Image (cartoon, rainbow, N blue to C red):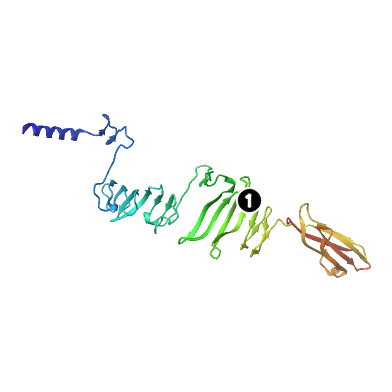
Amino acid sequence: MKSILIGIFCCAGVAGIAQNVGIGTANPQKKLQVVSADSIAVQIEGANLSSSTAAVGISIRPTNNVSFQWMALRGREDAFILNSARLRLTRRFDGVESTVMFVDEYGQVGIGGTEADLANPIPTKLSILQKGFSGNGIYLEAPYTYEGLFIKALSSNLYPNPSAQRITAIRFDYNQFYNSRITLENLGSTANPLLSFEMFNPTTFNHEKVMTLDRNAVLMNKALGVEQNLTVAGNTSLYQNLTVAGTINTGMVRPFVDVDMPVNFISEIFCACPNGLKAIGGGGGHRDYNTAAQDIKINYSGPDPGNDSRWKVIATNTNTTQLRAVRVYAICANIQ
């Protein structure tokens, strides 16, 4: 009996003195250090669990915290899916347990919500489920220039030709109903990819292109409404309606020429646009807009039939004793 008591006291003394515990190592560097030649050093397994939600795991909890009870990492088998597995990070806050993140056997990752909230029937590698919590879904901060979101299509047995691939980079749905999407397609040539904005048509059950961008131009497939100013610095191709409630600035200029017309004389006067611009409007008349303006009669004012970059005015000075100053102007713009 004495030897047994001595053995107990010795073990208690060793346990009280030890600062770190090592398994597989004689010199542990942490409170618990496990060194193993096996690929799995630690295995935690629940025995005879009656419910799949009661899977065992590891719980981490702070000290002297009332509202936040614990955070737990658990592995469990789904009771309703054969040969399934889940790795779940859960927390308990104010007496309510919720899922923070989970990974299933297919590599699907869910942040927030539960496994039942995964998109169905379309599987997704990453699901961010807000479930009533406010805040942004994804936040990217770049300390230097780089691709914040990088989507790359690779050749495979299903798609051996990258030039024929279509990538849906972003899709927007409302209550799991198709809405709109942004796609990238190569149309036979990787040198000229097309970026398209598409809207879902519930009548035809197809996504229809609203606007397409390529390396050379922008193609509007539907009507474009502009409520404020629209400034066009380059070429724009529009094959359907353009509705503008504000101002369109197409790089217009308004040159003019002044001519002194002899008495009782008729003359053709031209105002030329700068190189590369076309005359989309113009006019002419007496330069000083005073009572002498009645002496100038405009016989023709319009585009030059022989040169669309000039505005043409045919005017007559009906005064029989005095010269009259005539100004002709053109409205020029860079249009096709």
Residue 111 x/y as whole percent: 39, 51
Can the viewer see residue 94? no
* Horizontal arrangement in the rendering, residue 322 relative to residue 135 (left or right): right
| 318 vs 118, nearest the viewer | 118
| Residue visible at 85% across and 66% down in the picture | 300
Residue 194 x/y as whole percent: 61, 51
| 13 vs 112, nearest the viewer | 112
| 85 vs 178, nearest the viewer | 85
Q: Quadrant of residue 328?
A: bottom right
Q: Is residue 61 above or below residue 135?
A: above
Can the viewer see residue 271? yes
Q: Quadrant where the C terminus lies?
A: bottom right
Q: Quadrant of residue 20?
A: top left
| Residue visible at 12% across and 34% down in the picture | 8
Neighbour class for label 1 at 10 Å: few (<14), some, many (≥20)?
Answer: some
| Residue visible at 82% across and 68% down in the picture | 290
Instruction: Give the residue type at disc 1.
Output: Asp
Q: Quadrant of residue 14?
A: top left
| 133 vs 188, nearest the viewer | 188
Q: Quadrant where the N terminus lies?
A: top left
Q: Farthest left residue? A: 1
Residue of label 1: 214
Residue 58 x/y as whole percent: 29, 45
Helix or strand or loop: what does disc 1 sit on?
Answer: loop
| Residue visible at 54% across and 62% down in the picture | 205
